[in-house]
Image (cartoon, grey):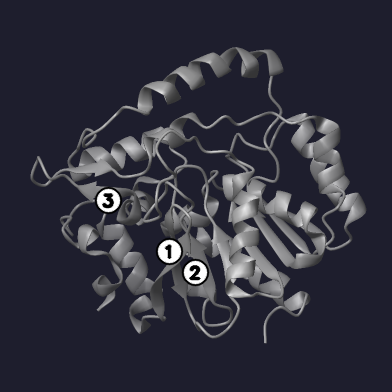
Amino acid sequence: MAERLLSPMLLKFNHNNAYIRPILQYIQKKKLHTEPSVKEIRIPVKWGHMAAKLWGNEHERPILALHGWQDNAGTWDPYAPMLCDKRPILALDFPGHGFSSWIPDGMQYYPWDLPRLILYLKDYFKWDKVSLLCHSMGSIAGMRFASVFPDDIDFYIAVDSLIYDDYDLNQVVAHYSKILRKLQALQDLKGEPPSYTTEEIIKIWHLGTTKSVAMKSVPYLLKRGAKESTKEPNKYYFSRDPRLKHILFSAEDKKLVETMVKRIKCPTLYFKGIDSPYASDEHSVEMREIIAQNNSNFESHFVPSTHHLHLNNPELIEPIILNFLQKHNFLK
């Protein structure tokens, strides 16, 4: 029964595999065989569609869940079933990620497009407010939306990021030429990328996140982030847009960032992974302190986990999120 929650691709994996078996055991332990309502959604956009995964009541305004860079909506698979009977969750695949369309040929991804997409979803679904549950790049997009549209958001939950970390601007600018050349080369890249066995692709994804995504957690992302090769039987390739590897993450003026975070007035919950290297620099700490000084409904929690704490250890954040939502009357 529990196995029906997993995608066809995942079910092709050997269930005796040391990486897959813990996921099935986790599902059974959490009694997810009750099968909360899960539905695939497609939202039309000018260049195709954005894909999303909806847990829970489709007639109630959901919490919009946003993933991190090169991840996908599957990042919320372990946590969403814990909450969706109380509030539905709509987990989005950002453009170029998961099942969403890639942007047109010749273009490149731009981080400020993401808060605009949040606005697009609000208008498309005719939501009166936006409720945000975000991780990493998604958290930064959420922060920007919450600061630019402070009256259009009722709460904001951020996992392990609020702003981009502080960078050496000389290194940032020096690196731009390499990024632009790689983007230029990718414009003419065609055909199927390299493919790997199940064990290989799990290990590559794990190591590619500097071991932030636990080996047992990688299959949640593979369900939407890999496709079976048409050339090599029983092998898989990464299906996200390769242009995502070379996004121009522009470092922003600190005064601009400070001005933005001061405008966040909705109840805000922040999680910091103790074992994560991100958001530990002086600038990030200072910005968190400024939010706390200007927003009496801001709270932060330090969790013993990596950058992907919501994916690896959802049981650590579940009671905190539940308490936060109850405290601010966001649950019926």
- Judge the density around disc 3: few (<14), some (14-19), many (≥20) Cα neighbours within 10 Å: many
Residue situated furthest right in the rendering: 293
Q: In this figure, which residue is indicated by the disc labeled 1?
A: 77
- Are the residues at dot 1 and dot 3 in contact (C-beta closer than 8 Å)? no
Residue at 47% in and 35% down = 107
Residue at 40% in and 46% down = 102
Please tell me whether residue 64 is drawn above or below residue 248 in the rendered image. Answer: below
- Judge the density around disc 1: few (<14), some (14-19), many (≥20) Cα neighbours within 10 Å: many
Q: Position of residue 199 (x, y in %)?
A: 22, 42
**Dot placed on the residue nearer the N-terminal end, 1 or 3:** 3
Amino acid type, label 1: Asp
Give the position of the C terminus as an image quadrant: bottom right
Residue at 58% in and 73% down = 125
Q: Position of residue 301 (x, y in %)?
A: 71, 54
Residue situated furthest front in the rendering: 46
- Are the residues at dot 2 and dot 1 in contact (C-beta closer than 8 Å)? yes
Q: In this figure, which residue is indicated by the disc labeled 2?
A: 80
Residue at 32% in and 51% down = 222
Amino acid type, label 2: Ala
- Are the residues at dot 2 and dot 3 in contact (C-beta closer than 8 Å)? no
Kind of element beneath mark 3 = loop
Q: In this figure, which residue is indicated by the disc labeled 3?
A: 19
Q: Where is residue 176 in the image (x, y as percent from the top left)?
A: 57, 18
